[in-house]
Image (cartoon, rainbow, N blue to C red):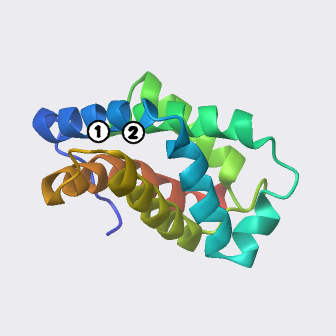
């Protein structure tokens, strides 16, 4: 769905997402379980992370979840959060780390599986909040793949 722009007024969905992220990150195994799932999802993913410091990577992903929440609430892809999203997209682009657009679908699926396991309040509404909140950032990263 190219050109998707989050409704910046949908603060209830973003707040549901943030509360779920807090509950997940409060559990030490959440990020480990996510990366176990993600690395098991494909040979390509395993190869991309072969020489990665996963402890550092876990913290970066946790930070990026909050970044994507802020960016998704900013209309017109403007502001500090979208500037940081541009830098993130450049690092993941074909010309740099070469993270293909399809890998973001695997990333989200594995992230949702881990959230389902670690958030005691996980529900269809919580899942929808994760998807709705992360969608603008994911689509931005996918669209910028060939332009970095």
Instruction: Looking at the picture, tell me which residue is in the foreground, 101 or 54.
Output: 54
Q: Work out which residue is located at the far top of the displayed protein and give it.
A: 80
- Apparent side of residue 7 relative to residue 54 in the rendered image (left or right): left
* Circle 1/circle 2 CB separation < 8 Å: yes
- Apparent side of residue 13 relative to residue 136 in the rendered image (left or right): left
Q: Residue at x 16, y 60 (%)?
A: 124
Q: Quadrant of residue 42?
A: bottom right
Dot 2, how many residues are within 10 Å of its Cα: few (below 14), some (14-19), or many (20+)? many
Circle 2 sits in a helix, a strand or a loop, which is it? helix
Query: x, y (%) of residue 86?
Result: 56, 39
On the rendered image, what quadrant is the N terminus found in?
bottom left
Residue 20 numbered mark, or none: 1
Q: Residue at x 42, y 29 (%)?
A: 26
From this viewpoint, is residue 73 visible? no
Dot 1, how many residues are within 10 Å of its Cα: few (below 14), some (14-19), or many (20+)? many
Check disc 2 and report the residue beneath it. Answer: 24
């Amino acid at each position: 769905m190219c050109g998707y722009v989050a409704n910046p007024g949908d603060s209830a969905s973003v707040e549901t997402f943030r509360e779920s992220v807090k509950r997940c990150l409060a559990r030490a195994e959440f990020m480990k379980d996510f990366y176990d799932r993600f690395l098991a999802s494909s040979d390509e993913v395993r190869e991309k992370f072969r020489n990665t410091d996963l402890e550092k990577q876990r913290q970066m992903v946790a930070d990026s979840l909050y970044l994507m929440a802020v960016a998704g609430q900013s209309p017109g892809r403007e502001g500090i959060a979208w500037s940081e999203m541009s830098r993130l997209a450049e690092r993941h682009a074909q010309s740099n780390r070469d993270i293909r657009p399809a890998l973001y679908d695997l990333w989200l699926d594995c992230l949702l599986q881990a959230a389902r396991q670690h958030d005691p309040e996980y529900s269809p509404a919580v899942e929808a909040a994760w998807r709705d909140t992360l969608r603008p950032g994911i689509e931005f990263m996918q669209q910028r793949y060939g332009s970095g």
